[in-house]
Each structure stands twice: as C-alpha cells, then as structure tokens.
Image (cartoon, coloured by chain):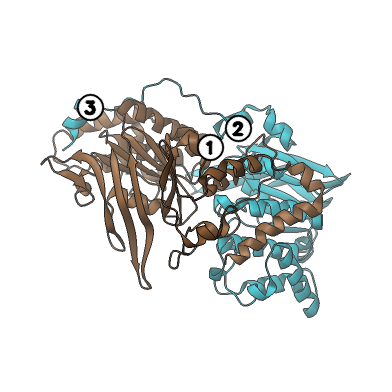
Amino acid sequence: MKTILKTEHLNKVYRLGSFTRKVSINALNDVNLTITSDEPVIVSLVGESGSGKTTLAKTILRLVEPTSGKAMVYDRVVAGKGQKQGKTEFLRTVQPIFQNPFEAFSRYRTIDSYLYETATRVARLGKDAAIQAMEEALASVGLEYQDVRGKYPNQFSGGELQRASIARALIPRPSLIVADEPVSMIDASRRMIIINLFLLLKQKYKTSFLYITHDLATAYYISDYIAVMHHGSIVEFGQAKQVLSSPQHEYTQLLLDSIPTLTHKWVQQPHSAGGLTPEEASNTRR
Amino acid sequence: MIRLNNVVGTYTTQRGTVNAVEDVSLEIPRGITLGIAGESGCGKSTLMKVLYGDLGFPLALSSGSVDYGFRDEHGQAVTSQNIQKEWFKRISYIPQSSMSSLNPVVRIRDQFVDFPSTSKNKAQVLELVRSYVQKLGLPPESIDAYAHQLSGGMRQRIMVAMATFFRPEIILADEPTTALDVVVQKGILLLLMEVQQEMKNTIVLVSHDMGVHYQITHKMLIMYAAKAVEYADTDAVFGQPLHPYTLMLTNSLPTIGDDRARQGLPGHPPSLWNPPQGCRFAPRCPLATDRCRVHEPPLVEHQPGHFSACHYAENVPELKASLDQAPKLSDIVENAPMFSDIVGSALKVDEVAQ
C-alpha cells in the first residue's frame, strides 16, 4: 500500500490584529490524515466556510507554511520540517486547480502560454514535446489546441476555462491534484461534466484528487474517501459512501440534515415567527 | 393574485437591445411561495427586477404589464408604474449579498429606521425592531452592530427582518442563501417559511438549487433563455415534469444515496442576441424534431394547473423513466470505455453549441 497523502500534527495559526488587540485563529488544529491505497483515489474534504479546508489545501500546495507539523505526498515531505524538494520538482508531484479560473489566470496572457510554460519549465519538455503534451492534455478534457491557441481568458466560458486549467494541471502528470472548489463557479446544470471528467482522469492518468468542496452531494458521487472538517480539525474520516450513509460524528449529521434534498421534506417545528401584528404594522407604516 | 401579462424585459446596451425576459404571462396566487429556476442568464433575476418595479436604465419593461392585485391609498390599481411607492411597505426584496446591501459605516439600527433623527417615536420603533429581530432568532443588541461585525447568516437574518418588518404582501428573494453554508441556509429558509405561515404573504424565490425549491416552494416556474417553459405545482414539477429541460435540470445533480451516473446538461443556452427559430431548447433536447426547430411551442395547460411549452410534453414521462433507469456509476466506471464515451459526448456537445 502506498501512502498517497499523510499529515502529521499539522497546525496553522493565523495571527491578526494590532499590538494591543491580538487575535489568533487556529485554522488547522492538529490535523492527522493518512490516505493509503494502491489505486488512485479521490478524497473529498468537506466542511463549512471557515472550517480550515482551504488552509489545508494551501498547506499541501505550499502556499501556506504550517506553524508546526508536516504534510507528505507519496512519502515525500511537501510542507513543514524536513521539506527539501525544490519548487519545480514539487510541482511535478502536486498540481492545483483553483475555484475561479478567471482569477487564476491573468487577463493579459493567453491560456496556451500558461500551458506551454508548465510543459517546458515544470515538466521540462522540449518545444515539440511540449506542444504534443499540451495537445494531449487538452484533448483529454475535450478541448482542441487549435481552439485554445492565442485566446485570452475572457474568450472562454467558465466551464471551458476550468477545463483548460485542468488540462494545465495534467501536463506534468502529477500524482496528486488538489482541486479547491473547482465547480462552485460553474452553473449547476453543467457541474457534472467537470465532476465526471475527474473520474475519467483518475482512471486514465492514475491521478489522485483531493477534492475540496462544501457540496456533499458531489462529494458522495465521486469520492472514495471523505474527510469532514470542523473548526480546523478533521472530525470524521472514512469511505465516502459509508460516512455519508451512516455518519458517526454529530457535526456530519448536522451537515447532512441541512442539505435540501429532493427525497424528503424538512419537518418544520411549530414555532411562531411573530413580528408585528397587522394593526401594529399598519400603524408603524408611514 | 399577481398577474403578469406578456412581460418583456429589455436591456439597452451599446450593441442594441436584448430581451432578457420575453413574453412571460403568469398568474401567481396569493399566499404561496413561487420558485423560479433556470441556468445563469435565463432571465430569472431580470424577471425579479421587473416584479419589484426596479425599472431604470438599462432595464425597461418594453411591453406587457404587471398587475399586483392591490390598490394604493388613492384607490388606484398598483402597476409597474407606481409600485415603487409601495417598496418595503407592501413589496420587499431580499438580496443575495447582504454585505453589499447593508451600509458598512452605519449601524444596523440606523438603517432599520430611516427616520429624521428628531422624530419622537424613534425609540419606540427601535423597541419594536429589537423585539422583532429577537423573534427572528437574533440577539436584540445585534441591531447596534455594524454590518461587518455580524456573521453572514446573521446579516441575512437582518435582511429578512428588514424585508418583513412591515408585513408586506409580497416578498421577493433573489438567491437569498447562495453565499451561505448549508447549516445556515437551512435556518434562513425555515425562517422564511415561518414568516410566511405567520403573515400569509406571497414569496417569490429565485434559486439555482433545485433542492431549495423542493423544500420550500409551492409552485415553480422554470425559465430557459428568457422564456417561461414550465409552470406547475412543485410536487408535479419534480414528480411528473412535462418539459424535457425541467427533467434534465432536476436530473443534472447527484443526490446522496443515489448511485446513478449523472451527465449534467450538455451544451450552452442560446445567445439572446440571436435566439434560434422555433423552440429555444431544441438544440440540446433529446426529444427535438424538425417541428421544434421551426415552430415555437406556446406555454399551454397540459394538465389542470400544469403549464408546459413543449410540443412533446406527453413524451416527457417516458424520457424520465429512461433516465431513472440510468446505469449505476460504479458499473460504468469499471467498464472504462463506456464511461469515457459518456464524458466525451457531454464534452463534445458542449463544443458544438459554441
């Protein structure tokens, strides 16, 4: 069994405020997560906003330095003590996909220049090999190099641009792709196209995904494992179908109860919302 | 009863005019929650603006009318021309982003009572506000805070409190919970339901989340490319939809405990600058024939209270049955080539529609 991702006592404290009014936020609170598998896996990280899921992703992507502890991808330390890899070597193993592709790419550069740069600098390919790799990566996400070449981000739709950013992440053939809310900017009716693409790429390129989301339904759909975060800690971890069909932790249960499903309607507690009486309202109206 | 008669909402731009809402006729019974759903750009927010009477450049009501079914203090029927005078009193609006709707440099309580500061009964009104926000699940002192000092959920509750304080007959909510967590979202939606049960007002709710619609709406309007394509009771919309677009929209997202493979909705909605002849959904529709590409189907009542704009509405239940039979995800993922066909076809159709 290979260790795909492992964190050991990972902590991150954000310090805010001035000299007199110090505030510290434990964005990551002793996070221990171990994912071992021989096959590539999709791991979902779910939780409410402010639960620390993006901080964990950024730590694994080396965008945030942890306060203590370390994170490892395939037994190589990527963050924290003992981290030796150079940046390009690191980016060959781990690649990011961000939430909003319009913010991830500069408006003043063409999309193919990003892909080309990834191919030449990170994957260290020659000119011809780079273009071949770009063509292949774009084809695997359903785009054509001819259609992408020379285009700026504003010439794409959100879904297409997100697919281009997935293609860019695929070029160095990373073993782990960290996708931070990759579909929340895409219209609900077309999200599944991207989600299914992740499943296909997992098979085709043997790439593992860390899928960060607040949407438990898509997490249920694609993930093999799921980790539920709450206040900087992982409160529940396990096989996705199992965790979401019989949640153990009360926070997971609360999350599941709150999803507006199409199967059963919420029970409304008989409770008066009150407000002004009709007479009071008409008197108070000017 | 709110009655919309052939409403056309037009935006004027440098390129010319474009109809973001086209020929929508609708009767909304009093005291229900109406949900409006559709993809981004289908005109649901524009319809909401027209309903609110927020008609200023570049948006205009270029033809049709809205009849609100109530009279103003002079006994005149309220229409789009004079609804602005009834804002907050009889019609109110809950926006999506509470942070950009509240003034960041004024305390909540001063935004609540926009009175001249000499007014004698300000303290009295503030007491009413305090007790009211308490009933809506907020600490009474929260109205002394500035907007940024409250959490997103609390701010949205403040917006609900502001919108409902005068017991308006109509409440328009445009994606009121999109920026919130599911846990907070449930609280806000249950609050809206409670308010409605208490005050018996008509709520019009725009959301892209079909789950939200299923939970709290009584009737639903499905919009596609500026047109109304289906209008019926919520249970009928989800149970026996009569428009293929509705069916594909409700089927496009996975649900927990359901292992069927989902495909999403391939392709793009048409450009409103140059809408196709005939049915606007035809290029993406599995039931489309040549008739659809030439003749536009009108919104007609197929069953009592169930309107649909589709020539082949009677074939939709069959399509639904075939989608219900979709293979399980685990079965087709193991059979990799078949799965890549599905993903590939969705991607390719996306390209063609460009």
Q: Residue A62, percent across and down? A: 70, 56
Amino acid beneath label 3: Pro
Tell which subunit mark 1 falls on: B
Asked if marks 3 and 1 touch (Cβ < 8 Å), the reply is: no
Residue annotated with mark 1: B240
N-term-proximal mark, 2 vs 3 = 2
> Can marks 3 and 1 be said to lie on one chain?
no
Location of residue B136 (image quadrant): top left
State how many labels appear. 3
Amino acid beneath label 2: Leu
The chain coloured cyan carries which letter? Answer: A
- In this picture, residue B125 sits left or right of residue A107: left
In the current view of this chain or complex, which residue is farthest to the right?
A1
The crowding category of the residue bearing disc 1, from other C-alpha atoms within 10 Å (few below 14, some 14 to 19, many at least 20), is some
Tell which subunit mark 3 falls on: A
Q: Residue A44, percent across and down? A: 69, 44
Give the CA distance from mark 2 to mark 3.
38 Å
The crowding category of the residue bearing disc 3, from other C-alpha atoms within 10 Å (few below 14, some 14 to 19, many at least 20), is few
Q: What residue lies at 30% left-to-right and 30% top-to-bottom?
A: B130
- Find residue A256 and name its label: 2
- In this picture, residue A140 sits left or right of residue B70: right
Q: Residue A60, percent across and down? A: 71, 52
Q: What residue lies at 33% left-to-right and 32% top-to-bottom?
A: B31
The chain coloured brown carries which letter? Answer: B
In the current view of this chain or complex, which residue is farthest to the front?
B291
Asked if marks 2 and 1 touch (Cβ < 8 Å), the reply is: no
- In this picture, residue B296 sits left or right of residue A212: left
Residue annotated with mark 3: A278
Q: Look at discs 2 and 1 and give the one toward the viewer.
A: 1
